Amino acid sequence: MQFVSTRGQAAPVGLSAALSAGLAADGGLYLPAHWPQFEAAAFADETRLPAIAQQLLAPLFAGDALAAALPEICAQALDIEAPLRVLPTANSWMLELFHGPTAAFKDFAARFLAACLLRIAPASERRALHILVATSGDTGAAVGAAFAGQPGVRVWILYPDGRVSPRQAHQLGAFGDTVTALRVQGNFDDCQALVKRALNDDALTRRLRLSSANSISLGRLLPQMSYYAQAGLAHWRTHQRLLGFIVPTGNLGNALAALLARRMGLPIGAIVLASNANATLSDYFAGADYTPRAGIATLANAMDVGAPSNFERLRALYGSDAELRAELRAERVDDDQIRHAIRHSHARHGVVVCPHTACAMVALERLREAGDGRDYAVVATAHPAKFDSVLAPLIDAVPAPPAALAALLQQPSHSEPLANDYAAFSARINACPL
Ligand SMILES: *Cc1c(COP(=O)(O)O)cnc(C)c1O
């Protein structure tokens, strides 16, 4: 498979090149040149995530040096449970994506990307690989966990100081020597801008081998299709109906993966974006011009994004705004509604949700009120224990952290302050040995 830029001004490249590059040469984002088509029956009775991912991704890996390693990559990286649980209201489910090592859905993608990048380096390459990652809370931890302790790899995590939950902050600084956490005096978009500038800095990239692990990375987008395929197939086999998904959304990586899986023929119904108070997407889907803006801080901090980086991909998939608006809807949920949903989900349904998942619960309620009785799964993107500081004042039943998260929280944690200043950032990475 060849991969083409959303801007159409760069030559198509193979998978390994697209995975390593991050951005295309024209500044665009990579998408497959065409969409392989599957029918549900092609997966027979397969229910295991690594096996489904392997089959789904095989045509995208075809012709690349990584193709032979795909089974091993899926087996290693995607060995994470993604249970689909029934919710106590009619035709409603929850897809739990928080059973990986850092208790958020980012683990699937970060582990897959790591498994790919670690296999791409040419044997002659002796320099360390520097992975740059801007995070609004969860990506940094997932990437840190995926690469920690790998010989020849350094990870730089940039996160907005004071805008991640205390447990997220602890986690980001707890991976040890090969993973440096930089707390930036700015917001998530500032962190993302610093990373983007470093990747485009010729002087720096001549000296250091750089790669990124942000949500624009093709290597994160592709594996995320697999849990939608798994859940959609399971639902289809049992009910012969399409399962829709309500996806807590920030940079649009997770929701885009659902859309792409549907485009490849998987049995997936309506896709609904649930945003926090950041209104860029809800305004656009309500008919306004697309207007990226500064991110504002909310209780669902991993979605504090004012300029969703995958919007460019979304737009490239459709001929016009009208066509795109017909495919998706977006619900904006403010902090008071998040608090209400956390309390209400617990009291009424006995389900404890993180603040991001709470946005999707609110969106589900709005759909039901509007008379939409179709089958939906709320996508649970993080374990509620990661956000105990938000939940504790609202409910008296905050669950204990899962074992892997608990182990990280026991480790000492260290982060370095960084001004929101590119010169300071490049000097810091440059000071690192090759
Ligand atoms: C990253 C994240 C999101 C948003 O996902 P995108 O792919 O950026 O849209 C939602 N919830 C949680 C818990 C996250 O960590």
Image (cartoon, grey):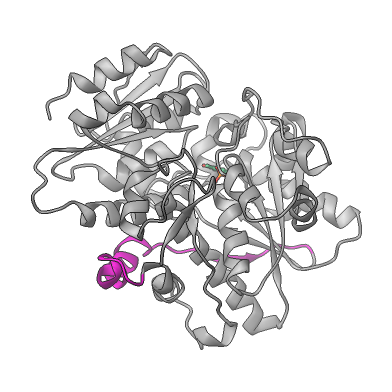
Where does residue 269 sit, x and y in percent of width and height? 71, 68
For image coordinates 31% across by 72% down, the residue present is 71
Q: Residue at x 45, y 13 (%)?
A: 185
Camera-side residue: 243 or 20?
20
Q: Is residue 340 visible?
A: no
Determine the residue positioned at 36% across, 59% down: 15
Left/right of residue 274 with respect to residue 117 in the rendered view: right
Q: What is the span of residues highlighted in magenta in the rendered image?
A: 62-89
Total numbered labels:
0
Compared across the picture, whether 91 is left or right of 72 comes to right
Which quarter of the figure has residue 102? top left
Classify 53 as above or below 351: below
Q: Position of residue 243 (x, y in %)?
A: 69, 69
Residue 214 place in picture, x, y as percent: 43, 40
> On the picture, is 243 further left or further right than 385?
right
**Is 67 within the magenta?**
yes
